[in-house]
């Protein structure tokens, strides 16, 4: 008879904070490792920064809306907050370590960030971001923007996606155009409205622009520039069209067109197919610190998920922390949102972290059981020893629950002959009393 303990606290997790069962965590870690490997293959160096920062550091560049979402508190006399992205801590890090870094400084960071926004599917209060940035000292070649795009393409190809679209633009094009037609004082507001286009549609965008007291003729010109009144076209045709107008709308517009042209051609030199890259002048990115190239990435057929990777070029990363001009370019992958999509489609979803479960057929937990498991591990086979006394059928259930593909069984005969019996739990195939070298080869060839 059980007695109810009135002191038991309900085990519940805060809303918007993700916890996974081991099989899902394994998948999440594999996705994260794949992204990390892609980053490292392009020469990005790992970086980790504290989850907690001084509030004065985090809020140096944060806007009012961001500050509303930050988890901020005091401990003693210290006013601190949880980081809301990985870019501001990077700026602090570069400023603090400026004299110890080699520029261009290339870093990647994969870590948790915190925002007190309303949780919903694909959006959490605690979530992972996976960032890369290239930071220059005084200047940074525009070819780095193309390399960032090549890295993004590598990430999604290595994750098994063939159909994705990296949409690319340059903010100087829109900014230069708006200043040329006398709307320079409304560049930020117009950019914010255009950034919402995919959610609100063209008609509502025009209404938003009307609210900003923009003349109908200017609205038509903006729509024409963005290509919203034309059928889809190729990158080359867009560049050709923009190049014809380059001298018409001023130096800033021309610089943006020249940069976009250089980046698109360099992306091709990096081996990225045009099928995965498209010029889209409606990509302006809402954050004010982007100054040139901007990009967003969408999974073809799953655009409703939203952009799974975005970023761009900025003129001065750490100007609020150090008297140095440090231009950069970078992107951030919303790893938690991406995981929501990949969980069902990723080709490693049903593979266990463990290759083989080593068990005793007769509950004799002797040294051979441990030695066999160690021999598997020494050969690069991930093994788990079952060290509890239980019926063999319960050991099979344990392996099935953990989705372990193989079981190595040791009984009286195996101990006497120095062999193991191996069973493929996926196919049901059995290998009676085989040598360890053969068992290792079988597992390696099937895992």
Image (tube, grey):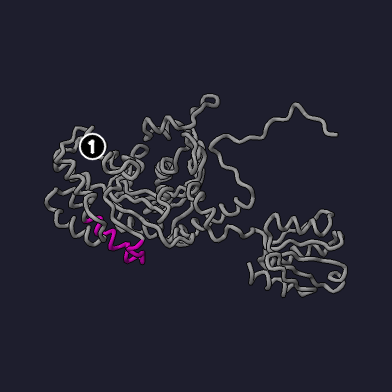
**Residue in the image at 79% along x and 70% along y:** 420
**Residue in the image at 38% along x and 50% along y:** 330
* View extreme (front): residue: 203
Task: Report the magenta residues as a range.
Answer: 258-275
In front of the other: 377 or 309: 309
On screen, residue 108 versus residue 403, left or right, reads left
In front of the other: 315 or 2: 2
Query: What secondary structure is the magenta-colored segment mainly?
Result: helix
Residue 367, x across and y down, in percent? 83, 62
Residue 348, x across and y down, in percent? 57, 60
The quadrant of the picture occupied by the C terminus is bottom right
* View extreme (left): residue: 248
Label 1's element? helix
Instruction: Determine which residue is flagged by label 1.
Output: 209
> With respect to residue 160, does 176 lie above or below?
above
On screen, residue 434 versus residue 32, left or right, reads right
Please state the total of marks drawn on the protein image: 1
Residue 175, x across and y down, in percent? 22, 44
**Residue in the image at 69% along x and 30% along y:** 9
- Specify whether residue 100 is in view: no
Crowding at mark 1 (Cα within 10 Å: few <14, some 14-19, many 20+): some
The quadrant of the picture occupied by the N terminus is top right
- Specify whether residue 405 is in view: yes
Q: Quadrant of residue 357?
A: bottom right
Residue 78, x across and y down, in percent? 51, 27
On screen, residue 427 versus residue 173, left or right, reads right
**Residue in the image at 11% along x and 50% along y:** 248
Magenta segment: does it hold 274? yes
Q: Quadrant of residue 446?
A: bottom right
Magenta segment: does it hold 14? no
> With respect to residue 166, does 377 lie above or below?
below
């Amino acid at each position: 008879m059980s007695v109810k303990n009135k002191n038991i606290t309900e085990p519940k997790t805060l809303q918007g904070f993700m916890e996974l069962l081991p099989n899902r965590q394994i998948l999440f870690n594999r996705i994260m490792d794949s992204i990390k490997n892609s980053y490292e293959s392009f020469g990005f160096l790992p970086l980790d920064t504290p989850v907690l920062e001084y509030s004065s550091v985090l809020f140096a560049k944060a806007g009012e809306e961001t500050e509303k979402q930050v988890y901020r508190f005091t401990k003693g006399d210290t006013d601190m907050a949880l980081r809301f992205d990985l870019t501001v801590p990077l700026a602090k890090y570069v400023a603090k370590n400026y004299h110890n870094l080699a520029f261009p400084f290339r870093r990647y960071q994969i870590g948790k960030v915190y925002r007190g926004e309303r949780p919903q599917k694909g959006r959490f209060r605690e979530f992972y971001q996976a960032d890369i940035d290239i930071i220059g000292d005084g200047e940074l070649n525009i070819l780095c923007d193309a390399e960032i795009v090549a890295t993004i393409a590598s990430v999604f190809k290595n994750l098994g996606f063939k159909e994705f679209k990296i949409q690319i633009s340059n903010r100087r094009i829109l900014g230069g155009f708006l200043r040329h037609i006398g709307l320079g004082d409304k560049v930020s507001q117009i950019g914010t409205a255009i950034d919402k286009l995919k959610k609100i549609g063209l008609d509502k965008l025009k209404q938003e622009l009307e609210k900003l007291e923009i003349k109908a003729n200017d609205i038509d010109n903006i729509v024409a520039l963005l290509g919203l009144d034309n059928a889809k076209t190729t990158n080359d045709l867009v560049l050709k069209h923009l190049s014809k107008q380059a001298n018409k709308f001023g130096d800033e517009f021309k610089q943006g067109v020249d940069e976009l042209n250089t980046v698109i051609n360099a992306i091709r030199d990096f081996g990225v197919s045009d099928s995965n890259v498209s010029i889209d002048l409606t990509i302006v990115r809402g954050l004010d610190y982007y100054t040139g190239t901007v990009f967003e990435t969408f999974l073809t057929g799953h655009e409703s998920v939203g952009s799974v990777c975005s970023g761009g070029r900025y003129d001065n990363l750490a100007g609020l922390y150090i008297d140095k001009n440090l231009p950069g370019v970078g992107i951030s992958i919303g790893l938690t949102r991406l995981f929501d999509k990949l969980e069902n489609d990723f080709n490693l979803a049903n593979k266990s972290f463990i290759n083989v479960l080593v068990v005793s057929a007769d509950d004799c937990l002797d040294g051979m059981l441990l030695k066999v498991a160690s021999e598997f591990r020494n050969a690069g086979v991930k093994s788990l020893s079952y060290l509890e006394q239980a019926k063999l059928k319960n050991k099979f259930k344990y392996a099935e629950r953990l989705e372990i593909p193989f079981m190595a069984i040791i009984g009286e005969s195996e101990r006497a002959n120095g062999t193991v019996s191996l069973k493929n739990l996926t196919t049901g195939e059995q290998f009676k009393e085989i040598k360890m070298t053969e068992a290792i080869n079988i597992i390696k060839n099937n895992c």
